[in-house]
Image (cartoon, coloured by chain):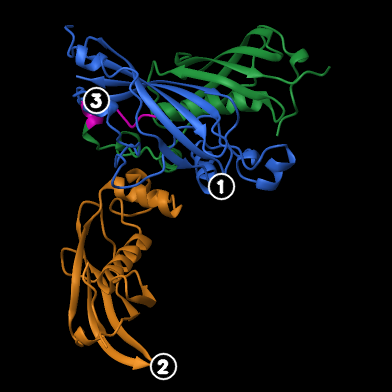
Amino acid sequence: MADVFEVTDEIKAQYGKETEPWVSEVTTTSVRMYARGIGSTDPLHYDVDYAKSQGFRSIVAPMGYVGTPVFHPDTNDGTFGFPRRGGGARLNLPTKGLLDGGTETEYFDYICAGDTLVETSHLAEVKVRGNMVFVTNEAVFKDQATGKVVAKQRLTSIHLG
Amino acid sequence: MPQVYFEDVQEGQEIPEIKKNCSTQQLVLWAAGSGDFYQIHYDKDFAQGTGLPGLIVHGALKHAFLGQLVHDWIGPGGQIRKFGCSYRGMDYPNQDIRCRGVVKKKFTENGKNLVELDVWTENPDGKKTSPGTATVALPSKA
Amino acid sequence: MADQTYFEDVKEGQELPSFTIAPDKQQLVKFAAGSGDFNPLHFDEKFPMLKAMGLQDNIVHGRFKYAQVGRLVFAFAGPKGRVKKFGVSYRGMDLIGKPITVKGVVTATRKDGGENLIDLDVWTEDADGKKTTPGTATVILPSKG
């Protein structure tokens, strides 16, 4: 199949350009809702006293939680919830279908309720295989209080043409 | 949004209605916001298994719509004192739900300017599916 | 909470305790709630994109499967260990209500920069044994010493 999309120099010029910082509060409610969403009953995700007794600051965000956005109607996508911050949004990607291609997270510390994360991300790569366009973004999450990097995440989405 | 004042309100007056039409996604968003994950609101087979014709709109969501109706009307200077509705009929996704209200009584009590309203949701047949009442305090021009 | 696993107890080739789930629509709606991803692809069987993509039924969120792999490695790390890195790619779709088994196997044990590291292959597989979400993880474990 012929490629449905061309990775132009204009697109390549966007590689590595950092978005504006995006702030999200990790709350006891958001952690519990996510844990409920994955069907976990581990008290480390629900019970603050128990989590503290195990050496954590508060309940621990389940692995996979990183990147869960806080929602504001002016700035976030109504379906996927993620913040629209330019970057990938202006690539004019095909829209017949959208699939998740892959997720990779590197943790420097566990994320707990009460943390406030500041995320910046950039477009890392666009690849085309036939009718599939693979778009990879890389995000860095810092703890707002300490400025330390707590996680890095690589996300690949597949846009179908 | 312009502020409505106590002096502007007449008994029998209808307040500006709001119109809703819930997508299935809206019902799932409500499940998320409320924590009510009962499947009759998003799982058609489950809903039909309980004898319903299909998915139905959460009663509490219609209650929230009526809350929005009143909240929008009273403006930032007003205050909702009391508010409730009962669920008398079902509403379905992708069908219009008119949220309406009419002023029943206005009076002053303990220095507060109070307005009582009948509020309700109405289906496309004109049936009141969630009738209720509200009492609000409004600011005075004086 | 499972007991703590220590670095010295782990051998190459060792399998992690696997688990099987069959997420129903309610579970996926809860995941939509928890993750903020409200794509109707995952809960509305009449959503037009399903048909356009040739799918018979709603599909499980990739990130849901990722989080299941996360549960596996988080439990393995225990409260004194830490998940350092884990990633998967989404190679196959899983339909709502069908069993998904979450598995992992130790590929290496090593020490690096004072950390006791365990490398793992991790994945989810469907009822036919197809790996729909293959990936890798690295976990730091405490030492008995």
* Element at label 1: helix
* Both labels 3 and 1 in a single chain: yes
Whether pointer 3 and pointer 2 mark residues with C-beta atoms closer than 8 Å, the reply is no
Quarter-of-image position of residue A22: top left
Amino acid type for the residue under numbered disc 3: Gly
Would residue B112 appear left or right of B75 to someone viewing this image? right
C-alpha distance separating marks 3 and 1 = 34 Å
Give the class, few, some or many, for how many residues have Cα within 10 Å of label 3's Cα (few <14, many ≥20): some
Q: Which chain is blue?
A: A
Which callout, 3 or 1, points to the residue nearer the camera? 1
The chain ID associated with circle 1 is A
Task: Judge the density around disc 1: few (<14), some (14-19), many (≥20) Cα neighbours within 10 Å.
Answer: many
Amino acid residing under circle 1: Thr
Visual hue assigned to chain C: green
> In this orientation, does residue A154 appear?
yes
Check residue A97 in the rendering and tell me which mark sits there, or answer none: 3
In the displayed structure image, the side of residue A157 where residue B100 appears, left or right: left
SS at circle 3: strand
Q: Which residues are magenta?
A: C49-60
The residue tagged with tag 2: helix, strand or loop?
loop
Task: Name which residue type carries label 2.
Answer: Asn
Task: In the rendered view, tell whether residue A45 sits above or below residue A131.
Answer: below
Chain ID for label 3? A
**Chain orange in the figure, letter:** B
Q: Where's residue A150, x and y in %?
A: 55, 29
Horizontal and vertical percent position of residue A40:
57, 37
**Gap between marks 2 and 1 measured at Cα:** 41 Å
Give the mark count.
3
> Circle 2 is placed at which residue position?
B110
Q: Position of residue C103 (x, y in %)?
A: 57, 18
Q: Is residue C99 visible?
A: no
> What is the magenta segment's predominant secondary structure?
loop
